[in-house]
Amino acid sequence: MFIHKIDEELSLKLAEEKDAERLFELTDNSRDYLREWLPWLDFTKKVEDSRNFIKGTRQGYAENKSMTSMILYKGEIVGAASYNTLDWTNKVAYIGYWLVKDYQGNGIMTRVAEALTDYAITELGMNRVDIRAAVENVKSRSIPERLGFTLEGKIRQAEWLYDHHVDHAVYGMLAEDWKKRKAGGM
């Protein structure tokens, strides 16, 4: 079982089937809020959908292609963060995340993204970490910006959100830059 303690109040744990009810509850109670930027809400209509999602993420983890973790804040699941894809050939980890509205503003997601970035580079040996967010999603974009990621460009119409496409801002962090930053050189 993967559990990564970030600090006294925050940790990540690999998603398990027993988390399906809590995950669905968070999704269902935050549906309108999450819908603005996440494309999968219409596919999550019952607990079984969350359970099937978790099964799929466990398969990705077993195949070493991805890793989805539950964000635990003071022991309670409040969102999810993942390596949506682990590209071992090119040594790139693609991070994705979401947090329910009630827990935003506590620095949770910045600490999570920092921990995932550090883990990808120092433990997994990745050369690059990639975070993408809709150009208009200011809250999500502020996380890689706070962590010193480089805005590398924009992908036009990168994602379909229910009735329209959104452009994505692409942020990258190279291992050499991360190590300099951690050493105090950036």
Image (spheres, rainbow, N blue to C red):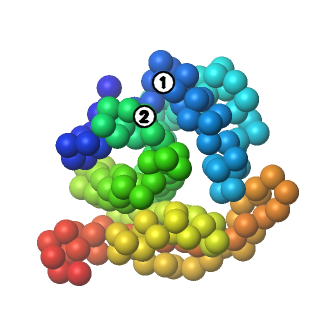
**Tag 2 secondary structure:** strand
| Residue at x 58%, y 29% (from the top left corner) | 25
Q: Nearer the viewer, mark 2 or mark 1?
A: 2
Residue 10: x and y in percent read 29, 43
Residue 42: x and y in percent read 76, 39
Give left or right: position of 36 versus 83: right
Give left or right: position of 144 versus 74: right
State whether residue 151 is above or below residue 39: below
Q: CA distance from mark 2 to mark 1?
A: 8 Å
Residue 109 lies in what quarter of the image? Answer: bottom left
| Residue at x 32%, y 32% (from the top left corner) | 75
Question: How many marks overall?
Answer: 2
Most extreme residue toward the left, as rendered? 183
Query: Badge 1, how many Cα within 10 Å: few under 14, some, many 20+?
Result: some
Front residue of 161 and 130: 161
Residue 32: x and y in percent read 70, 47
Say if residue 52 shows up in the picture. no
State whether residue 166 is above or below residue 161: below
Give residue 19's mark: 1
Residue to which mark 2 is pinned? 77
Amino acid at the residue labelled 1: Asp
Front residue of 91 and 78: 78
Give residue 39's mark: none
Residue 2 lies in what quarter of the image? Answer: top left
Query: Badge 2, how many Cα within 10 Å: few under 14, some, many 20+?
Result: many
In the rendered structure, which disc, 2 or 1, sits on the residue that comes first in sequence?
A: 1
Which of the image's four quarters has the C terminus? bottom left
State whether residue 20 is above or below residue 183: above
